[in-house]
């Protein structure tokens, strides 16, 4: 089970970041649990510098540029140099800030070219009775991998994050049966984009108001490979309780 903790901009103090890392190191000792932390960029290098645990690190985003005279940009090679292994790309908050499908596709290509495993975020803003949201999710996945070779596509992790479920409570999160259907649908889309049986190696995560109260039900009712956790990952106690529900 892959647990990706997206700290967003919630964690700003080094002491708090170190406490969350210490908790994650203990949790990562559990069998079957892999933990990836995505701290704010300035903290990532500090935390990863002396990390000798099973905890891995992710960039919350990367630049669509290849470097140069671009003040403030953080490129894929820079994150790789800071010991990031993953990159969260296409998150709804980045899409809202202007990342189009074409920009996300370029970022995926940059990430893979420099050894980062992309975590591609997809998801609809709202559900409709005609199933148009399914076409939107398909389009986001298809457009994102357009520039990639078949081998590169096998390395992409898809994180399904419906916007309507983000930032709500567990009671308003996705229904476990609906999640199971979406995971099956996403696997079908991936299978169409990958040769032979290679799609079986692709991971599908879920994100959207995942909390200790609902994570076990979501995991048990679906074939999901893990979770992309937001606000619940920045409180040591809550995060520990959430991960323990999966062990």
Image (cartoon, rainbow, N blue to C red):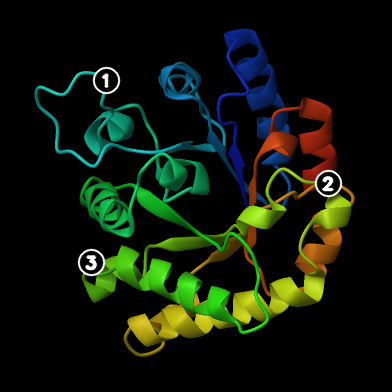
Residue 110: x percent and y percent? 22, 48
Marks 3 and 2 in Cβ contact (< 8 Å): no
Judge whether residue 214 can be spotted in this image: no
Residue drawn 71% across and 54% down? 165
In terms of image quadrants, where is residue 151? bottom left
For discs 3 and 1, the disc positioned in front in the rendered view: 1
- Toward the bottom, the furthest residue is 196
Which type of secondary structure does the marked residue at label 2 adopt?
Answer: loop
Q: Quadrant of the C terminus?
A: bottom right
- Toward the left, the furthest residue is 68
Q: Residues within 10 Å of mark 2 (few under 14, many from 20)?
A: some
Which type of secondary structure does the marked residue at label 1 adopt?
Answer: loop
Reading the image, the residue beneath label 1 is: 72
Depth check, front residue: 89 or 59: 89
CA distance separating discs 3 and 2: 36 Å
Q: Earlier in the sequence, mark 2 or mark 1?
A: 1
Q: Earlier in the sequence, mark 3 or mark 2?
A: 3
CA distance separating discs 2 and 1: 35 Å
Residue drawn 63% across and 76% down? 182
Which type of secondary structure does the marked residue at label 3 adopt?
Answer: loop
Q: Residues within 10 Å of mark 1 (few under 14, many from 20)?
A: few
Reading the image, the residue beneath label 3 is: 148
Residue drawn 33% across and 38% down? 62
Residue 188: x percent and y percent? 50, 85
Reading the image, the residue beneath label 2 is: 169
- Toward the front, the furthest residue is 129
In terms of image quadrants, where is residue 32? bottom right
């Amino acid at each position: 089970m892959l647990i990706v903790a997206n700290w967003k901009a919630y964690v700003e103090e080094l002491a708090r970041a170190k406490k969350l890392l210490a908790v994650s190191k203990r949790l990562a000792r559990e069998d079957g649990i892999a933990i990836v932390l995505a701290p704010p960029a300035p903290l990532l290098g500090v935390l990863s510098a002396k990390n000798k645990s099973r905890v891995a690190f992710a960039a919350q985003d990367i630049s669509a540029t290849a470097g140069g005279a671009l003040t403030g940009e953080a490129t894929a090679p820079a994150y790789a140099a800071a010991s990031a292994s993953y990159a969260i790309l296409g998150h709804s908050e980045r899409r809202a800030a202007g990342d189009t499908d074409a920009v996300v596709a370029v970022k995926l290509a940059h990430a893979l070219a420099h050894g980062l495993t992309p975590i591609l975020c997809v998801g609809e803003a709202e559900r409709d009775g005609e199933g148009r949201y399914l076409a939107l999710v398909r389009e986001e996945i298809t457009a994102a991998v357009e520039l990639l070779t078949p081998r590169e596509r096998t390395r992409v992790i898809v994180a399904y994050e419906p916007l309507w479920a983000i930032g709500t409570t567990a009671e308003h999160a996705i229904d476990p049966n609906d999640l199971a259907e979406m995971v099956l649908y996403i696997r079908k889309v991936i299978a169409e984009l990958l040769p032979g049986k290679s799609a079986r190696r692709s991971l599908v995560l879920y994100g959207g108001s995942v909390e200790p109260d609902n994570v076990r039900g979501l995991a048990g009712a679906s074939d999901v490979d893990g979770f992309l956790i937001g606000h619940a990952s920045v409180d040591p106690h809550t995060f520990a309780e959430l991960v323990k529900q999966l062990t």
